[in-house]
Amino acid sequence: MGAGAGGGTGSGATGESRGDDHFRTFRGRFGTPMAYGLALLSIVGCTFVALAATGQGADAANRIAIIVFGLLGGVIAWRFGAVRAVPDPAGLTVVNYASSRRLVWAEIVTVRFGPNDPWVHLDLADGDVLAVMGIQRADGEYAMTEARRLVSLISELGEAPEPNIGPVK
C-alpha cells in the first residue's frame, strides 16, 4: 500500500455507501478483543489469587500488592486494546498506546503499509510519520481492506481546497 490515493475495497466502502459504514472506526480485529480479555483476566485472576491465598505469606500487604499488580496489568492491557483511528468528515483521530492525535484530512500525504510493517503509517504534510496501530498486519486481509478504505477516505476528503483566486488586475 504505497499510494496516497487508490481504489476502494470492493466491499461497498468505495464511496457508494455514505452511511455509518463509511466512517466506521478502524480497530484491530483480533488484538483488541484479546487485549480486553487479557485485562479482565489480569484483574480477576490476581484478585482471586490474592483473596484465596492462605498461609504464612498471605498477609494484607501481600494481598493488596497482588491486586494492585493485577490492576496495573489490566490497565496496560486495556490501553493496548484501545488503539483505534476514528474518521469523520473533518478528519481522523488516531489513538495509539500512549498518545492521541487529531488530523484534518489535508494533513495526510500518503498511507504506507509495506509487507514488513506491523501497522499502517501515515506520512504527514509537516514531515512527521504517524503510526495507525488500529490497522494491524496481524489481521491479514482484513487489515489490507481497512488500509484501502483509509486510502479511499483520504483520496475523497484529503484534498486541500483550492484558494479562491480572482482575476489578476
Image: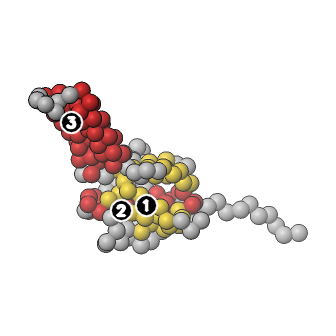
Disc 3: which residue: 46
Q: Is residue 155 left or right of residue 97?
A: right
Kind of residue sitting beneath label 1: Ala
Residue drawn 28% across the image and 39% down it: 69
Disc 2: which residue: 119
| Labelled disc at residue 131 | 1
Mark 3–mark 2 Cα distance, whole angstroms, equals 32 Å
Tag 3, which secondary structure? helix
Image: 162 above or below 73: below
Q: Nearer the viewer, mark 3 or mark 2?
A: 3
State which tag comes first along the sequence, 3 or 2: 3
Q: Nearer the viewer, mark 1 or mark 3?
A: 3
Query: What quarter of the picture does the N terminus occupy?
Result: bottom left
In front here: 2 or 162? 2
State which tag comes first along the sequence, 1 or 3: 3
Kind of residue sitting beneath label 3: Cys
Q: Is residue 52 left or right of residue 89?
A: left
